[in-house]
Image (cartoon, helix red, strand yellow):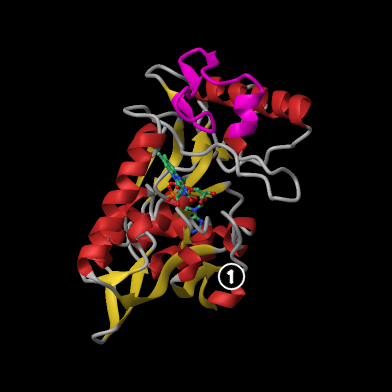
Amino acid sequence: MRDYRELTAFLEKKQIPYQLSLSLREYTTFRLGGSADVFATPRHADELAALQQYLKTADIPVFLLGGGSNLLIADSGFRGLVVHPAFGEEPEVLHRSSDRLSVRIPASARAPLTGKKISALGFAGLEFLTTIPGQFGGSVIQNAGCYGHELKDTITAVEVVTQGEVRTFANNECDFRYRDSLFKRDGALWVASANLELAAGDGAAISARIEDYKNRRIASQPKNRRSAGSIFKNPTAAVSDKKAWQLIDAAGLRGVHEGDAEISAEHCNFIVNNGKARAVDVYKLMLVIEQRVLETSGVSLEREVVLVGDFTQGG
Ligand SMILES: Cc1cc2nc3c(=O)[nH]c(=O)nc-3n(C[C@H](O)[C@H](O)[C@H](O)COP(=O)(O)OP(=O)(O)OC[C@H]3O[C@@H](n4cnc5c(N)ncnc54)[C@H](O)[C@@H]3O)c2cc1C
């Protein structure tokens, strides 16, 4: 095992909370994966910046973990430092008038709860977020979206920690795309918070939209099963006019099992953990999907889920 004494001495000096050999399972919606050698929970952007500054000269693999709802962690875990923002939950109101709300949301705020809080204030635009799990920072880098809405539509600026310094990116500098952004492509950009601007809406209409989105989820997604949401992105129109689940379905893979992991019979772009699955089981199903969809439709599916740790031995 790597020698982490210098790192832990640094964390103690800066009073950044940390734990050693911590199981990451409970930090993922799949409830899968091994442990992190070191798990640190900085409490504000300055601590995150100090940690990044330290890591510039330390030869330690590092991974930034949000709500763990869009990733698969290897059964062997992560040999290095996992950083998990713990900046709190509360939105900071920057400006509020009868028709507009400007608000800063910390990266560690739970995305669905944030959607509920803003909606309850009577401002529209985050109703869809009430149905997407994860931390708010994760939803920014992923430009999370559903039902025709994306987070980029309300973001005005994103505060990022990079190279040990705090920088602000305006919306048009973030290169937001479908389930993608500059921050997703460049792992050195850690989102600390984002500013949003929302217009006032009708309270009853906001509540009705939240209820509608919730019901649509219940109707279309696996119930009472652990997952990481959609495993693959939908192909662009230039590549295929079919959605990822349709290609997987057409390849005959609905309901296929590997151990206790299953290509969901309810929504076949989801892989579910039926209780005792291992990360390697999920990984093998991902490879089966990629190969069979390529053979049957000629489409190379692009992964939405992020793999963390070493999968070269299978998982
Ligand atoms: C049941 C279910 C339904 C879902 N439905 C949807 C949906 O409709 N639409 C949708 O878009 N997504 C959906 N998802 C996927 C997922 O919830 C979102 O992508 C979510 O925004 C990921 O956030 P997270 O904090 O969980 O990220 P994590 O899974 O923790 O991390 C994912 C990636 O983001 C990076 N990351 C996390 N936080 C930060 C940060 N602060 N700064 C920089 N990088 C960071 C990580 O390093 C990693 O590379 C669904 C997931 C589940 C389980």
Q: Nearer the viewer, residue 216 or 271?
A: 216
Question: Measured along the vertical axis of the image, is residue 291 above or below residue 22?
Answer: above
In the rendered image, which residue does mark 1 sit on?
174
Residue 287 magenta-highlighted:
no
Q: Quadrant of the C terminus?
A: top right
Question: Measured along the vertical axis of the image, is residue 91 above or below residue 210?
Answer: below
Q: Nearer the viewer, residue 17 or 240?
A: 240
x and y percentages locating residue 234 in the rendered image: 61, 44
Magenta part of the protein: which range?
A: 246-272
- The amino acid on which the numbered mark 1 sits, given as a three-letter code, is Cys
Element carrying mark 1: loop
Say whether residue 138 is left or right of residue 293.
Answer: left
Tally the marks: 1
Residue 265 magenta-highlighted:
yes
Question: Measured along the vertical axis of the image, is residue 27 above or below residue 175?
Answer: above
x and y percentages locating residue 142 in the rendered image: 52, 55
Quarter location, residue 122? bottom left
x and y percentages locating residue 268 in the rendered image: 53, 28
- The residue at 50%/32% (across/down) is 270
Q: Nearer the viewer, residue 209 or 298?
A: 209
Quarter location, residue 307? top right
Say whether residue 41 is left or right of residue 161.
Answer: left
- The residue at 59%/22% (across/down) is 285
